[in-house]
Amino acid sequence: MRCCTMYAKWFTLQCVRVTNAVQVRYQDTRENVPKYYPDLRIKERLRRLCWTSSSTMVKAKKFVIAARFDGLPKVSDFQLVEEDTPELKNGDLLCETLFISVDPYMRLFGRSLKEGDTMIGEVVSRVIESKSQKYPVGTTVLAGYGWRTHAVVHEDDKHPLPTAQLRAVPADFPKELSPGLLLGVTGMPGMTAYFGLIDVCQPKSGETVFVNAAAGAVGSLVGQIAKIKVGGDFSVSVLNNHMKDHGRVAVCGSISTYNNPEVKGHYFFETIITKRLKLQGFIGAEYQAEWPAATTQVAKWIVEGKVKHKEHVANGFDQTPQALIGVLTGKNTGKAIVKI
Ligand SMILES: NC(=O)C1=CN([C@@H]2O[C@H](COP(=O)(O)OP(=O)(O)OC[C@H]3O[C@@H](n4cnc5c(N)ncnc54)[C@H](OP(=O)(O)O)[C@@H]3O)[C@@H](O)[C@H]2O)C=CC1
Ligand SMILES: CCCCCC(=O)/C=C/[C@H]1[C@H](O)CC(=O)[C@@H]1CCCCCCC(=O)O
């Protein structure tokens, strides 16, 4: 009884705080959440109360393109703007971003963005208000709404990039792992590593695997899956001098050329011919149907301690442009993400 009364008092106190300062309270609650997946029952009840008792309008921040990229992107190419989130319609959910992914492909796709466009990117978010049965309040989701602190999305929205579709964190994703890893080692870069090695290269026992850009999100997982030796400059050192006859090369990217389209890769046709090499380009998203099983596998390896992962975390939404610039200049070790 005493316990109930105390709980009731505490609950009322929280509600008063909720009504008085919705945003601040929500922020406080989130920061108090223990590592990654807490027991959210009480906090979620409070949140539900908070977000359903009034029609929530959130002052959201987003980064838009201020100037088209020319060479290496600059902080001044991005502009931080504020907007009010719209009222939810049936099927809508209001997401609060927890993590933003910054990836090399953004530099390439950034070429087609024009001034005023919201910067693209995949995020992990928590649903804080919902008119969707599929994604109730408290659901952690992956979405592709770009560099925003909050966004209203519809449960049936389709994203042009296959990897950026709205979806809930897989039910079997280990509770002790950060959902942020779904942007890295168990997400798009991890899947690129997994299928690039296993399907494109099809390594056999006794073979040697070289990995280029092995400090990054993709390369660091390839290295662990294959228990490899790290190569040096790929084009010159590995391809020309170290490939064995009939070697296979899975080409997933070319980060050193993204900021300078004038630079052409080096193609060592004589070596390719005389060593009878196979080079295959691929896009990790092509294997999307097989991602769930591979994600489960990689997450299991992490839990078992067989795969180590590193995240290069920038703290705060305002740091997102710098985080992308860091990726394009080799500042990160492991997967670069921004924690909001
Ligand atoms: N085909 C596909 O589906 C996908 C392809 N990719 C591609 O894979 C590559 C790696 O991506 P990801 O691991 O996510 O990226 P990361 O940023 O995590 O890692 C990239 C690594 O590349 C090196 N690097 C960065 N800038 C340069 C540069 N200008 N010149 C030479 N090396 C550089 C850095 O290593 P160091 O510390 O050694 O400098 C860095 O650690 C990229 O080219 C990307 O476009 C990624 C995902 C999917
Ligand atoms: C020269 C292009 C190199 C791009 C390498 C890269 O980083 C690719 C990343 C993809 C990742 O798998 C998830 C994505 O959405 C990224 C872009 C996919 C582009 C697919 C384009 C296919 C097409 O044009 O048909």
Image: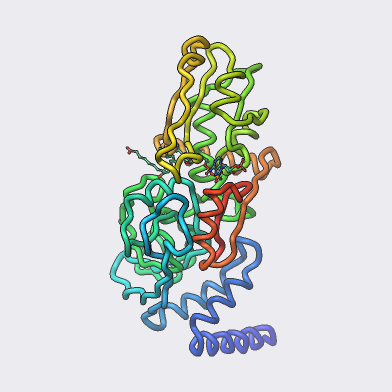
Residue at the image point whose x is 45% and y is 64% from the top: 76
Q: How is the image coloured?
A: rainbow
Q: Nearer the viewer, residue 284 or 303?
A: 284
Residue 153, quarter of the rendered image: bottom left
Residue at the image point whose x is 48% and y is 14% from the top: 270
Residue 66: give x, y in percent of width and height.
Answer: 37, 64
Tell whether 184 sits left or right of 129.
right
Whether residue 34 is situated above or below residue 238 in the rendered picture: below
Residue 104: give x, y in percent of width and height.
Answer: 48, 46
Tell whether 123 sits left or right of 85.
right
In the displayed orientation, state which residue is furthest to the top: 274
Residue 36, quarter of the rendered image: bottom right
Name the image quarter holding the N terminus: bottom right
Residue 127: give x, y in percent of width and height.
Answer: 45, 66
In the displayed orientation, state which residue is furthest to the left: 89
Tell whether 286 sits left or right of 305.
left
Residue 245: give x, y in percent of width and height.
Answer: 56, 11
